[in-house]
Amino acid sequence: MPSHFVATWHHEDPDDPIRIYEEIGDDRMELRKVEEFRDGRLIRADSINDGPTSLSWVPVPDIVEIEDQAEFTVEVLTDAMFDEVWRRAVDSIA
């Protein structure tokens, strides 16, 4: 069963996302992802839509491991919360 979370990335680079919304499978692989940028853009990727924002080829670390990094804050999301962000995002190849 997929799990969902958002990692807020605390940094100053205007070209990198500030939030990364993740849908992760039981094997810790990304199923769907949305990147949110400072200007409000939401770019999404899944196994079909791949481009500048794409799914990782390696398993995503455990939430605790991500949050142990000072530049990240992690919040667990419900399926509905993730789906709302997914619906508002555009495909990365659009």
Image (spheres, grey):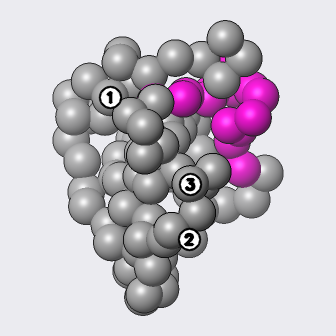
Q: Which amino acid type is marked by label 1? A: Val
Q: Which percent across, then down, holds residue 77? A: 24, 48
Quadrant of the rendered image containing residue 61: bottom right
Name the amino acid, label 2: Pro
Q: Is residue 54 magenta?
A: yes
Q: Earlier in the sequence, mark 1 or mark 2?
A: 2
Gap between marks 3 and 1 measured at Cα: 21 Å
Q: Compute the Cα span from label 1 to label 2.
A: 22 Å
Whether residue 81 sits left or right of residue 69 in the image: it is left
Q: Which residue position holds label 1? A: 85
Which residue lies at the image location 72% right of the left edge and 17% below the top edge?
93
Residue type pointed to by label 3 = Pro
Query: Which residue: 78% across, 51% down?
Result: 57
Q: Nearer the viewer, mark 1 or mark 2?
A: 1
Q: Which residue is mark 2?
A: 61
Q: In the image, residue 22 lies at what x, y percent?
A: 46, 46
Provide residue 48's location: percent of width, then percent of height.
71, 18
User: Where is mark 3, residue-wise?
Assistant: 14
Q: Which one is earlier in the sequence, the residue at label 3 or at label 2?
A: 3
**Span colored in magenta:** 42-56
